[in-house]
Image: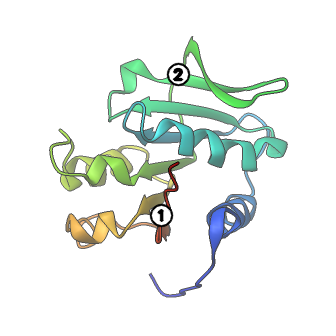
Amino acid sequence: MATREITKSVTGILRPYKEFVQGLGLKQGDQIAYFGCTGTCTPFVELLAVTVRGLHVDQVFVPLLDEAKAKKIQYVEDVGMQVSGGPAVLSPKLLVIMGGLAMPMMPVTKEQVRDLAGKYGGAKLAGVCFMSMFEKAGWLDTVDFDLMIDATIDPVIVTKK
């Protein structure tokens, strides 16, 4: 990783992601595959997916690294991008690895992610995490991201009555 840019807020996550994807020159029908934990990563995947919806690429969510469970991500009117019930066949031009996979107790290793990236040869590899999860898990010495977005959620302010 050579270039570092410091941004803020949700747009600081989405704008660099969209610019990166646009720079790949993907065509209609090319595929982006997001790999993450069910539940916790899914809303962030859908947020990333809505950012590039205008490119008309196919987008897919894969729970953990279980490619047999891949599901299409589709636009739902008045809702946004949603993981649908439909199965998907993988042929990604971009793999997006979510930081939840690097959390303790997840059944995914950095070597499995490296090997997954190698399986799709010329596909680009992006990582999106919070609170330096890839670094804390020691993944950066094994997984060679073309783009890594590491966001910080700090402070978190909770107000109760």
Residue designated by label 2? 71
Amino acid residing under circle 2: Lys
Mark 2 is surrounded, within 10 Å at the Cα level, by few (under 14), some (14 to 19) or many (20 or more) other residues, namely: many
Which label's residue is closer to the chain start, 2 or 1?
2
Is 134 drawn above or below residue 112 in the view shown?
below
Q: Quadrant of the N terminus?
A: bottom left
Disc sitting over residue 5 in the figure: none
Is residue 38 visible in the rendered structure shown here? yes
Picture quarter containing residue 43?
A: top right
Residue under the image location 61 percent in, 64 percent down: 13
| x then y, percent, for residue 64 | 33, 35
Secondary structure of residue under mark 2: strand
Amino acid residing under circle 1: Val
Residue under the image location 65 percent in, 27 percent down: 82
Residue under the image location 45 percent in, 59 percent down: 127
Is residue 32 visible in the rendered structure shown here? no
Residue under the image location 23 percent in, 69 percent down: 136
Residue designated by label 1? 156
Secondary structure of residue under mark 1: loop
